Amino acid sequence: MGEFDLIKNYFEQPQTDDDFVQLSIGDDCALVSVPENGWLAITTDTMVENTHFLPSISPQDLAYKALATNLSDLAAMGAKPKWISLALTLPNIDENWLAAFSQSLLQTLKDYNVTLIGGDTTKGGLSVTITAQGLLEKGNALCRHQAKVGDLIYVSCTLGDSAAGLQQILAGKKALSFEEKFLQQRHLRPTPRLALGQGLIGIANAAIDLSDGLISDLGHILQRSRCAAEIDLSALPLSASLLTLHDRTQAEQFALSGGEDYELCFTLPPENQPLLEARLKNLDVSCTCIGRIVPAFEGKWEKEKCGQFSIRFLRNGEPIDYSAKLGFDHFKE
Ligand code: ADP
Ligand code: MG
């Protein structure tokens, strides 16, 4: 089977019902129309074997996750996903693999009402690159640079599950118990928080999706917004499964420094709290306030103790004693 048959057999879809798509797979470019009062949000994510996923991953999970991580970026901007293109590099043509991969991809696209409009297919080490495009109302994006001193810091759902799930997968652990299944699924099948992202438009100041871990990703908001943060460790939302299989210190470490949760972290002016509560009633995800934005640190002591991340940690409202051994390694860097 050649490249063109491969595309036709596995990725070309019968007529799309997306009125924006003027021309889909088959020409040199796809053509889409963009609403006059709209902005296009564009993001790309690559997944390379042995770097971003293990060779043991199923084609179904790989397709799902490659798409979900891109949709998560759109969610973090508050954009509504519309189209993707897919650049696929394959070591060989394995029809069983391709059938499973494309079925999972096309089903997930359908679930999110997104259209595959083009791509590229090449030979080489297995890698999947997806470029996703979404729509925003002009001027209404959630950016990293607009957090304000006094904002409350929220995260969606629970943190640390994915890192704990990955640890099990790396250890070759089969998911037998409910907790193991839950954590491994959280790693393999993260949920892009699209409805939440769109619901935060107009009420949140800044947002990011958590791909590298809370400390690092919140750090991007702080750096871009030129401010610092106070985070209360006792407020971190941790799942029952995580706390069943790990002690609190380890669970906090996963939540702070583990990656790939793909939850949203956002900052909200306190006066918008009732608006957030109202919007959350119509969504199927919880959000937890874990701290607040404070002025950028100036003192030498804070700079030394809080490191490059500009985050001061509390527990039950009390500043943590930095001389005590902290449960996370990032702090020592
Ligand atoms: P070109 O050489 O003009 O870039 P290609 O021959 O690479 O085009 O691809 C032919 C058509 O198939 C194009 O419309 C391209 O967007 C689409 N395409 C190629 N690979 C994929 C893929 N993996 N998934 C979806 N569409 C693809
Ligand atoms: Mg061409």
Image (cartoon, helix red, strand yellow):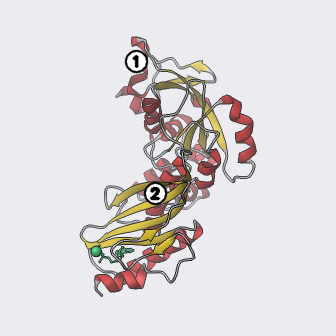
Q: Position of residue 237 (x, y in %)?
A: 61, 40
Circle 2 residue: 70
Which residue corresponds to mark 1? 303
- Tag 1: Cα neighbours inside 10 Å, few (<14), some, or many (≥20)? some
Instruction: Check disc 1 and report its element: helix, strand or loop.
Output: helix
Between residue 198 and residue 64, name the one nearer to us: 198
| Residue 246 found in image quarter | top right
Q: CA distance from mark 1 to mark 2?
A: 34 Å
The one nearer the camera, 124 or 49, is 124
Image quadrant holding the C terminus, namely: top left
- Using the image as rendered, state which of residue 216 and residue 12 is in the foreground: 12
From the image, which quarter does the N terminus lie in? bottom left
Ligand 1 within 8 Å of the CB at mark 1: no
- Image-quadrant location for residue 42: bottom left
Using the image, determine if residue 224 lies above or below residue 320. below
x, y (%) of residue 79?
Answer: 54, 53
